[in-house]
Amino acid sequence: MLLIPPRFLLRLTHPCRHHASMPTPDDDQLLNLGPEFALENFAAIDGKKNFASVALAWNEQGLGVQVEIRGKQQPLVGDAARPRGSDGLTLWLDARDSRTGHRASRYCQQFHLLATGAGEEREDPGFTQTKIHRALEDAAFAPAKDVLVRRTLRTGGYLLEAFFPAHAIHGYDPEQHPRLGFFYSVRDEEKGEQLLGLSSEFPFWEDPSLWSTLDLVR
């Protein structure tokens, strides 16, 4: 039995493509990211299968994130008061990609995208930000009203999209700092959890040294 999962031995830099027209004026989709924007998490190395496709793109105005869930049969589960227990995605970002320390800096942020659980009826998609445990210094909170979130229900799943404007990402500066530290966790009550790498035995939720690098390329 392996004590260390094979993906732990990899420290990958993931290319994040430039998308000049985000967010789109399309009423149907917020980002409209094609397969060329999808990230590979190499789950097969650990003998796992993905149930979600995660894509990211950037431009000078901000960062776009898209998650597509497939193969669902049960309804969505969500509670804005319990973001890490809700269907959706948690994204960790470090605008300085300083992965030498084990504790988050003021440039590290923890964002939650909820597939449901927001709004008066608790059935809308939503966004929230929480502090990172054991951080050396808490990051600024993004204005929730400025983060655009859209969910599209589909047969057997859904599409969840979000656009983070530049001012919502503390220290976002693609020209001077084109590399971001990042990690993600896709959660689904029915399908389980899909991670960018590692496994839940490692404290990725509080340790930036375990995150990967997002390279903002043109």
Image (tube, rainbow, N blue to C red):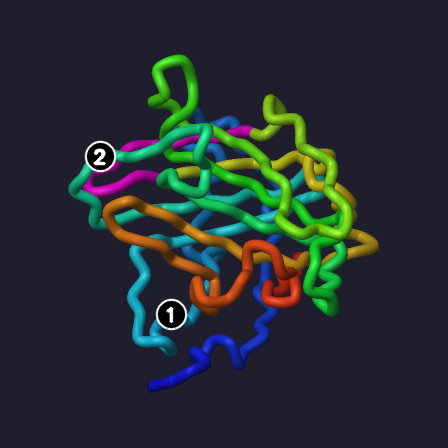
The label number, if any, that marks residue 86 in the structure image: none
- The N terminus: image quadrant: bottom left
The label number, if any, that marks residue 75 in the structure image: 2
The answer to whether the residue labelled 2 contacts the one labelled 1, judged by CB atoms less than 8 Å apart, is no
- Write the residue at 57% across / 65% down: 14
Q: Residue furthest bottom?
A: 1
Task: Identify the amino acid type marked 2.
Answer: Pro
x and y, in percent, of residue 93 in the image: 64, 51
Above or below, comparing residue 198 to residue 142 in the picture: below
Above or below, comparing residue 43 to residue 3 in the picture: above
Secondary element type, mark 1:
helix
Residue 217: tell me if it is visible: no
Secondary element type, mark 2:
loop
The reply to whether the magenta stretch includes residue 66 is no
- Write the residue at 43% across / 60% down: 195
**Residue picked out by circle 1:** 43
Mark 2 or 1 closer to N-term?
1
Task: Identify the amino acid type marked 1.
Answer: Ala
Q: Does 207 sit left or right of 138 as displayed?
A: left
Magenta highlight range: 148-159
Q: Does 58 sit left or right of 89 as displayed?
A: right
Q: Residue furthest right?
A: 176
211 or 71, which is in the foreground? 211
